[in-house]
Amino acid sequence: MKVQKRISKKQIKGDRLVSTTFKATEYIQKNQTPFIVGSVVLIIILALVLLLRTSANRKNDEASAILSRGELTAASGNVGQYVADLRTLADDYQGTPAGKVAAVRLASNYFYQKQYDDAKRYFQLILDHYADDNLLSAGASAGLGAVYELQGQYLDAAKSYRRAVEFTPDEIWTPDYLLKAGQNFAKAGDKVSAEEAFGEIEKKFANSADASTARRALAALKY
């Protein structure tokens, strides 16, 4: 009688691997179209990711080159071309570091030149495209508030200053934003919101330079 040979654990594992591989191969053969489609989709997705990265890098490089050219243009005294380069960057290269720099410079320059409509446009552009930068967004909101205040649009000014507070609720300049928000709410006739703003200074920033002004403004609202 022939003695039956024992199968080792290694052979069992080997047989399982072969069996599993065979089953997987058989499954792929039976379902070839879904696998091919899935592979093609994966390749397309990877290609798009690489394309977007390359495109983003190219866009950043182009924007940096335009900003560098603009700086040289400004140094040579051609301010008109410099402003045109900044506008190109801010409008067409949004999301790039150079585009952000351009938007900030344009908003600030237009404000100090009292070209308030252009200033508002670029302050708003900063808020629309760089909201992840809290410090910058707070400055843009306060800038909008200042423009609205100068134009006599006190309620819009107050809301913009209030939004600046939301971006940076605990910074050293926050009491100033609150004070300006309260003052403009008061001018707009919204005493409740004005009291809230002044009261917040008293509550959270009692040692700030704006606290005494806020207390006087709060007392004046009650008469």
Image (spheres, grey):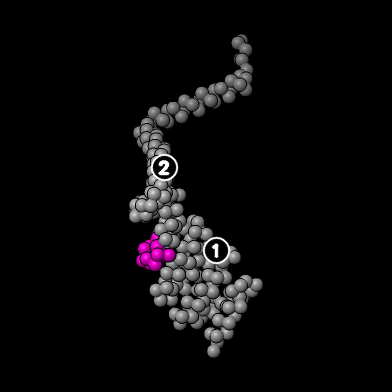
Q: Is residue 86 above or below residue 25?
A: below
Circles 2, 1 touching at the beta carbon (< 8 Å): no
Tag on residue 168? Answer: 1
From the top left corner, tell me how far across and down residue 81 is, in percent. Answer: 34, 52
* Residue located farthest toward the right when viewing the structure as drawn: 207
Q: Is residue 148 magenta?
A: no
What crowding class fits label 2: few (fewer than 14 Cα within 10 Å), some (14-19), or many (20 or more)?
A: some
Q: Amino acid at mark 1?
A: Thr
Left or right position of 160 against 197: left
At horizontal 61% and vertical 72% (from top left) the residue drawn is 209
Write down the quadrant of residue 11 in the picture. Answer: top right
* Residue located farthest toward the bottom when viewing the structure as drawn: 223
From the top left corner, tell me how far across and down residue 78 is, in percent. Answer: 36, 52
From the top left corner, tell me how far across and down residue 65 is, in percent. Answer: 40, 44
Magenta stretch?
110-122
Write down the quadrant of residue 60 in the picture. Answer: top left
Position of the C terminus, as image quadrant, is bottom right
Q: Is residue 158 above or below residue 40?
A: below
At horizontal 54% and vertical 22% (from top left) the residue drawn is 15
From the top left corner, tell me how far across and down residue 165 is, in percent. Answer: 53, 67
Magenta span main SS: helix
Q: Is residue 165 above or below residue 100?
A: below
Which SS class for mark 2? helix
* Residue located farthest toward the front when viewing the structure as drawn: 76
Left or right position of 93 against 14: left
Q: Earlier in the sequence, mark 2 or mark 1?
A: 2
Residue linked to disc 2: 61
Tag on residue 18? Answer: none
Q: Is residue 115 magenta?
A: yes
At horizontal 41% and vertical 39% (from top left) the residue drawn is 54
What is the C-alpha distance between the residues marked 2 and 1? Answer: 31 Å
